[in-house]
């Protein structure tokens, strides 16, 4: 599912709301999650999962084409850990 499909589904389930308002809500929620991760905060949505930022230290990699060593800089990457309820529903146990 992509963002536009999510907005369409919300509009179908909530015909009393305007689609442009739903689009604004979805964009606001995603932007707030993004800003929290930029600050290094953790975002937890109970039953769904938690978003956090993990640090990857600098390392020595290699160019797969030539085999030459390449220096890879330190970076921070987003990480998502599923919640128990989501894991169970996806696994078909709920």
Image: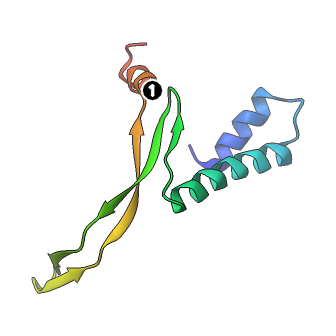
Circle 1 crowding by C-alpha within 10 Å: few under 14, some 14–19, many from 20: some
Residue drawn at the location 57% of the way across and 54% of the way down: 36
Using the rendered view, name the quadrant where residue 58 is placed.
Answer: bottom left
Outermost residue to the top: 94
Residue drawn at the location 65% of the way across and 55% of the way down: 31
Of residues 58 and 15, the one nearer the viewer is: 58
- Residue 1 image offset from top left, x and y in percent: 56, 43
- For this view, does 17 lie left or right of residue 11? right
How many dots with numbers? Answer: 1
Outermost residue to the left: 67
Quarter of the picture holding the C terminus = top left
Of residues 71 and 68, the one nearer the viewer is: 71
Residue drawn at the location 59% of the way across and 51% of the way down: 33
Looking at the image, residue 61 lies above or below residue 25:
below
- Residue 74 image offset from top left, x and y in percent: 30, 73
- For this view, does 22 lie left or right of residue 45? right
- Residue 80 image offset from top left, x and y in percent: 41, 45
- For this view, does 9 lie left or right of residue 50? right
Using the rendered view, name the quadrant where residue 70 is placed.
Answer: bottom left
Task: Give the SS element for disc 1.
Answer: helix
- Residue 66 image offset from top left, x and y in percent: 12, 86
Using the rendered view, name the quadrant where residue 83 is placed.
Answer: top left
Looking at the image, residue 29 lies above or below residue 11:
below
Coloring applied to the structure:
rainbow
Looking at the image, residue 21 lies above or below residue 89:
below
- For this view, does 4 lie left or right of residue 39? right
Residue corresponding to mark 1: 86
Looking at the image, residue 69 lies above or below residue 46:
below
């Amino acid at each position: 599912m992509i963002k536009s499909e999510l907005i369409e589904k919300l509009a179908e389930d909530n015909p009393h709301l305007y689609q442009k308002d739903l689009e604004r809500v979805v964009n606001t929620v995603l932007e707030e999650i993004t800003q929290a991760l930029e600050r290094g905060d953790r975002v937890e949505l109970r039953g769904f999962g938690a978003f956090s930022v993990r640090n990857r230290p600098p390392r020595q990699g290699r160019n797969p084409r030539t085999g030459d060593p390449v220096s890879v800089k330190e970076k921070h990457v987003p990480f998502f850990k599923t919640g128990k309820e989501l894991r169970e529903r996806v696994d078909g146990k709920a």
